Each structure stands twice: as C-alpha cells, then as structure tokens.
Image (cartoon, rainbow, N blue to C red):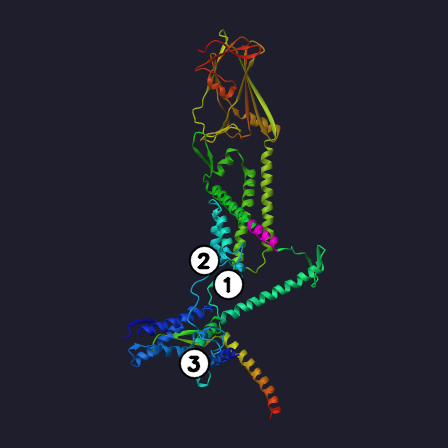
Amino acid sequence: MEKTTSYIIGGSVFLIDESAYKMLSDYLNRIESHIKQSAGKDEILKDIESRIAEILQGKVNAGKQTITTADAEEVMKVMGMPEDFAVGESSSAGNIPPDSGSYLRYKRFFRDPDHKVIFGVCSGISHHFGIDPIWLRLAFGLSLFIGGFGIFLYLLLAIIIPKAKTAADRMDMQGEKMDTHNMSEKLEDEIAGIKDKLYNLKSDAEKLKNKGTAWYTDTSGKNIFRNPPANSANVIVNVAKGIVKFFAFLIAVVMTCIFLMLFFSTWSGVNIIHIHEPGGRWLRYSIQNIFTLFTITGSLKANILAGLFLFFGVPVIALIVHSVKIRFFATTSFSWFNWIAAFVWIAGILLLFSGVSLLFAHFSVSGTTTKTLDFSSGKRHSIYVKVKENESEIVLSNDSLNLYISDEEIISRNPKLHIIASVDSSYHLNMERAGLGITKREAETSADGIEYQYILQDSVLNLPSRFYLAPSTPWRKQKLDVTLEVPIKDTVYLQPSIEKILGLSIQGGNYEKWLMTKEGLQRKQESPM
Amino acid sequence: MRKGVLEYCILAILSDKEAYPSEIIERLKEVNLLVVEGTLYPLLMRLKNEGRLSYRFIESPSGPPRKYYQLTPEGTIYFDALHNSWGELVKSVESITKIYKSINQ
C-alpha cells in the first residue's frame, strides 16, 4: 500500500500517492527549467499549476479520492511535454529526444570575458552567486582604503579562476542545461561573433596592405590609424587601463569627501579642521573660523570659497550625473552638459586662482613704524628685565610661523628682544613694528596694529612675552623688534624666562647678572643672586 | 511557421469574444489544430507582454479563478495585419501550386 501525502497546488489541496507526487513535482521542475528564458515565467508557472489543479479537481469531483500515477500521467498528456513549453519552439513531433530529467543544478565558476571591466572576476562571481557585479566592484575598490588587500585578492582570483572560453563554458557558468535548445541560441551568438572576427580579419588584411604608413584610408574613405600589434601588448594595455580606472575612481572618491567636508563645514559651521596642540589637546576650527581668523572677508572670501566649491564640486556632480545617465538615459547625448561642466570647472579654478593671488598680494609690501621710550635708571645703574608670562594658555603654536592662537581667536606672537649698548648715558627702548600689506600704507597700518604693553617701574622693565594685534587688525605677518639700549657699565639682571624672546641662554633660578660693555652684553662672573 | 499561424488563430478566436486557455484549446481541437497547454501559456504570456492581449479573472465553479484573455486595441491592429499577410500568403501559394499542379496532371 503506497504512502499518501497531501499536495498543495494552484491554491487547492489534494490527497496524492507519493509516486504520483514525485512525478508531478519532477514534471513542474522540468517545465521550469525549460521556460527559464521566458519573460513572465513565474506567471506562466502559476497558470500551469492552476490548470493542473483544475484537472485534478475535476477528478476529485468525479469521485476520485486520491491522485494516482495514472492521473499524473494523464495530466502530463493533457498539458504536454516540458520540451514544448519554451516560447517560440515548434511543437513536439518526436524529433526532439525527451528530457532525461537531469539538469545542471550547480553552476561552474568561471570568469566572464564578455562582461569584464578588468579581468571579469566580479562578473564571474556575480554569475555564480547571483550578486550584481557593481557591489563586488565597489567592495574591491573600497578595500583599497582598508589596507589594500583587495588588489591581491583580486589578482589571485584572476589567476585561479579560469576564463569561460567556449559556449559550453559560458553556459556552465550561468547554470544553463546544455541540450539542443540552448545550444542553438549559443551557436547563433557564436556565429555572430565569428562574423565580427571575419570582418576584423578583412580590415586587418587591409591594414597589412598599407604597411609602413602611420595611417591609411580604408574602403569607406575613412582615415584609420594602425592598430597596435601583438597580444602581450594588449594584455599590458588592459591592465594599465584597469589601473587607470582604479585611480580615477580613487581620485573621484577623495574629491567627493573633500567636497562634502567643505560643504557641511561652511554651511553648518561644524568644526572640521583639527590641529594638534603640543600639550596634547586637539583644536577644532571650522572653515568660517579660519577665514575670520586671518581676516579674509568680503569678496575675497567669496571668491576663494566659490573657487574651492567649484573645483571640488563640479567633478563630483559630473560623476553623479553621468552615472545616472548611464543607468537611465544611456542613449542621449550629454555633450552640452560636458561642455558646461568643463566651463564651470575652469571658472572655478580661475576664481580660486585669482582669490589666492589676491590674498598673497596682501603680503607683498612691507612697512615699519617705530616708537621709542627714553628713560634713565637714576643712581642704580642697573635694570631688571622681566618677562611677563601670559595668563591665558598657549593653545596653538606653530614653530615656523611663530603664531599663537588663543581661545578667543586672538593672534599673538613673540617679539624679538635685543639688548645693546646705548650711545649715550640713557636707556632707550625702541619698538620697531613691521607689517605687510598690498601697499606701503596698508603695511604701515598693519604694523601699527601691534599692541605691546610693557611696564617700566623703578628699574624693573616688565616685558610681555607676546605682542597682540589690535582688534580688527588683519593678520599680516606682523613682527616686533624690541631693542633695549643700555648705557655702558650698567648691570643688567635678566630673568630666565627672557630666553624666549632674547635668544641668549640664561642660567640660574631668578636673575642672572650681566654687564653691558663696549662689546655688548656679557655675563658677569659672579654667581647669580 | 506553425507558431506564427497558431498566433494568428488564437487572435482570431479572441477577436470574437474573450476566452480562457482551456476554451482556446478546445476550439482549436475542433478544427483539428492540436495544441497542448504547454505551448499555449507561454504564447499567451508573450502576447500579453507585447500589449496585444489583456486578461481578467473570473471566478469558476470548478476550481481556482480563470484567466479570461481578450484583444487589446493594439492586438486588434496586429490581428488585422496578420489577417492581411495570411491572405496574401494564401493567394501566392495557391497561384504557384495551381500552375505546378496543372503541369503535373
């Protein structure tokens, strides 16, 4: 007594013998593999299942309790043999051998030479696993940033995985069953390919005829350049093309990142520029801050910003537009867009260029102003020089620029101190301020913006370690030279902290004793106080 | 050739009124054109995808709802074209075979 089971098909349930069940499910599977290429094959299958259900229901209504193999055979006779199910095929007149019932359930792993970008690795993988090759290419490309192991993996795969050469290979790659039906399709493709090759052969023969000339006129009257010869060269060219494509992709990604950074930072004021402070803190500045800091304002700022945006943004936008175009509007010509994009991009470069050169022009001419303070030390014939350290922390310093930027966004710098002999018997404190500008006038104004608050009390000269720029004085690489003229034979007591601005090394804890001589400042031999 | 003719006949059947696949098979059997479901369904699907047929579901007393196919306006145009081609083909074939039949009599 055979086992019965329940069979759900076309929305109805039937009691069925197990052998009949196997027959019908095999039958449906074979039909499915035959109509694989048809559009709407899922719907066709549904229709077929509904029809089978209808037939079976008819039998049940006529009194049959369980579906038997005889019923299954009848269904198959009514519906037809699976071979007949393919669209566009002639009806079965026995000229096609019946389906053996076995079909290629697994796919062989090949590289696909017909859909390759470099070596067809991604296309091959996509056939085998059903993933769209775009994701795989993206993954390989992104892996470049994470240590670049993707390149090695890719090349390894390219060497290991064989290329699908023959029609049989290609069909195995895509998992198609090889029999007369598919064979004829593939053969037609092959024939078309051979026709192309024949055509190429013909034009190659023509080229041979015209050997020795760099270009020649072919039968259609066109001028053609000679083809590069040998096959090994082509392989190298292919690899080179692949590498170039990789790098173009890289550059595009980097530009996009910069562009996005610029975009968000400028509009939202988010602090994106990070500078590491010697003390170990990280400083954050936004683009706006940087501009304000160096007092780049108004049209100059607009120019530079616009130039930056266009320079980074246009390639990114062009890339996006072209990707969309390839995906959706493959056949339309976009040359006008390319022209406009190139034009705008060049305009951006020019803007950037002009903005930056204008910026540099502000640093071209120098000017100085000087202030002098004369005083005497009275009977003491000595002077103490202290350096007033700043209360506010140093938050940013750059040794080459010698620039300090504090939390309040004020720029300050160390002055340079010189101590030399005075030509007379009085002390003189000279402050020479220098600045840069686009004209001498502007340079001098920028020099005047230097603020230096020294304090002279009794014989103690208290010098700040830094000078500041008055508010609304733009930064123009201002410098301050402070010269202290000391009468000869007077003693100069120097505090160690003065090293920073004096350029002499001071020993000792508190003050070191120095003497002003005809030859300049010299260390006194006595031990420090 | 049989496939093209089949298409023509199916459209002819549907030009009269809408019908479901089993019905179409019955009609064809009546005039000795033997066709199985397997050949018909993909053909109907293709015609539908080409916009020449449309279908609607009608409940059936003996099972799942049935798909009733009908000609679309575009299908009607296509059918008329096929009709003309068929007519011309028949004329040409008949005139040639008439000549050679009489020679071989």
Q: Is residue A132 visible?
A: no
Find out whether the residues at labels 3 and 2 contact each other: C-beta distance under 8 Å: no
Tell me if mark 3 has few (under 14), some (14-19) or many (20+) residues whose alpha carbon lies within 10 angstroms of its own: some
Tell me the residue that label 3 is attached to.
B25
Q: Nearer the viewer, mark 3 or mark 2?
A: 2
Q: Bounds of the magenta span?
A: A231-243
Q: CA distance from mark 3 to mark 1?
A: 40 Å
Furthest residue toward left: A1
Q: Position of residue A229 (x, y in %)?
A: 65, 55
**Subunit bearing disc 1:** A
**Vertical placement of A77 versus A504: above or below?**
below
Tell me the residue that label 2 is attached to.
A131
**Subunit bearing disc 3:** B
Q: Residue at x 56, y 44 (%)?
A: A311
Q: Nearer the viewer, residue A246 or A291?
A: A246
**Vertical placement of A247 versus A428: above or below?**
below
Amino acid identity at mark 3: Ile
Amino acid identity at mark 1: Asp
Residue A467 is covered by the magenta coloring = no
